[in-house]
Image (cartoon, rainbow, N blue to C red):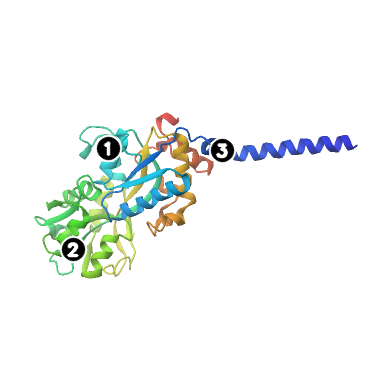
């Protein structure tokens, strides 16, 4: 009888160990394989002081703190710049909005026929709300009133510089675009040298808050008809609402159009590293919120579904482990 009991206990131990191994094997397989990981990662942060820069720097801190890989956030011209650098293997991580990603993947607009198809998505970053900021004393009441007036659109290759002209094309107006860092063009707005600043930015956006700390301002979004036409023509945009109270100047809910931003990497990034970065982002949202307070609102797997570029294989593995049913469009060619 005791022999039977010992045999049953041994079988039970073996089954228990098998269960434990099956639950942890995939994670161990990824986390233990660090031999191919980069020793240093560079992250594209956009303009210094902007929401993208601050949030990206915190993302880099997360990589360094939890994955023990040195990370440096670098100032850049924005999403199109990140796409080019990551596609060439000259940068490891960066934020990129859906518009420039769609154009880069298909060789449109700024890409000028060259297709940037080495980039892969990892996690959602934030939703960028579309509006133009003017001083309260400005005669500009609608976007049409900017025809022929000076409008700051940030650095060349940034989201406003590449996407706002599409809105004005629908409206049939031509502002005089002024390029530069958002810090510089905001100073020009304060000094009355330009009429407005075009933003496609997360909430809260530091530059807008800083402006309203010293100046009365107004936010001008696309009107409803323009928004409908724009979203229909460019489906990687969607309609959204900037909530009342988001800024001092926003007294009631403000309908506008929204563009999603994602963290991207190269398809050549080791699967295990991409997996761990994706995992860390979802597991350390509270840590990331010190860089972008609304991060927890954006960090949802379904917010990846509209990405115009496929996921990295490592990210695919993570989402599948969490039971996420991914659209076929997000599965990369090398992962099918």
Q: Residues within 10 Å of mark 2 (few under 14, many from 20)?
A: many
Q: Secondary structure at mark 3?
A: helix
The spot of residue 18 in percent (x, y) is 68, 36
Question: Reading the chain from its start, which is encountered first: label 3 or label 2?
Answer: 3
Question: Reading the chain from its start, which is encountered first: label 2 or label 1?
Answer: 1
Q: Which residue is mark 1?
A: 84
**CB contact under 8 Å: marks 3 and 2:** no
The residue depicted at 46 percent of the width and 44 percent of the height is 68
Instruction: Please give the count of numbered marks on the rendered protein.
Output: 3
Q: Residues within 10 Å of mark 1 (few under 14, many from 20)?
A: some
Residue 305 seen anywhere in this rendered image of the structure: no
Q: Secondary structure at mark 2?
A: strand
Q: Which residue is mark 2?
A: 134
- Of the residues tagged 2 and 1, which is closer to the observer? 1
The residue depicted at 14 percent of the width and 52 percent of the height is 178
Q: Which residue is mark 3?
A: 28
Q: Residues within 10 Å of mark 3 (few under 14, many from 20)?
A: few
- Horizontal side of 169 relative to 119 (left or right) equals left
Question: Reading the chain from its start, which is encountered first: label 1 or label 3?
Answer: 3
The spot of residue 218 in percent (x, y) is 22, 66
Residue 79 seen anywhere in this rendered image of the structure: yes
The spot of residue 307 in percent (x, y) is 36, 43
| Nearer to me, 125 or 56 | 56
| Nearer to me, 210 or 157 | 210
The residue depicted at 34 percent of the width and 49 percent of the height is 260
The spot of residue 279 in percent (x, y) is 48, 45
Please identify the quarter of the rendering in which residue 197 is found: bottom left
Q: Residue furthest right?
A: 1
Q: Secondary structure at mark 1?
A: helix
């Amino acid at each position: 009888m005791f022999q039977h009991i010992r045999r049953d206990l041994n079988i039970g131990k073996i089954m228990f160990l098998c269960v434990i191994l099956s639950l942890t094997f995939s994670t161990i397989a990824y986390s233990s394989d660090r031999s191919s990981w980069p020793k240093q990662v560079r992250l594209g942060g956009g303009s210094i002081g902007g929401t993208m820069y601050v949030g990206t720097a915190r993302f880099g801190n997360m990589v360094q703190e939890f994955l023990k890989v040195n990370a440096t956030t670098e100032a850049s011209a924005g999403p199109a710049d990140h796409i080019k650098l990551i596609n060439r293997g000259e940068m490891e991580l960066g934020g990129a909005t859906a518009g420039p990603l769609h154009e880069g993947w298909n060789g449109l607009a700024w890409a000028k026929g060259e297709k940037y198809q080495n980039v892969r998505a990892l996690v959602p970053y934030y939703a960028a709300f579309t509006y133009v900021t003017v001083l309260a004393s400005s005669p500009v009441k609608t976007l049409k009133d900017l025809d022929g007036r000076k409008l700051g659109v940030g650095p060349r290759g940034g989201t406003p510089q590449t996407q706002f002209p599409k809105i004005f094309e629908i409206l049939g107006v031509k502002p005089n675009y002024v390029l530069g860092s958002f810090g510089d063009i905001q100073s020009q707005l304060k000094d009355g040298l330009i009429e407005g600043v075009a933003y496609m930015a997360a909430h809260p956006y530091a530059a807008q808050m800083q402006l309203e700390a010293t100046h009365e301002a107004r936010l001008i979004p696309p009107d409803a008809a323009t928004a409908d036409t724009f979203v229909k023509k460019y489906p990687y945009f969607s309609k959204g609402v900037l909530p009342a109270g988001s800024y001092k100047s926003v007294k009631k809910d403000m309908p506008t159009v929204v563009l999603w931003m994602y963290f991207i990497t190269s398809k050549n990034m080791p699967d295990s590293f991409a997996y761990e970065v994706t995992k860390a982002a979802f597991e350390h949202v509270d840590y990331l919120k010190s860089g972008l307070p609304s991060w927890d609102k954006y960090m949802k797997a379904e917010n990846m579904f509209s990405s115009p570029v496929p996921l990295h294989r490592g990210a695919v593995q993570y989402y599948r482990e969490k039971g996420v049913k991914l659209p076929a469009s997000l599965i990369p060619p090398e992962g099918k």
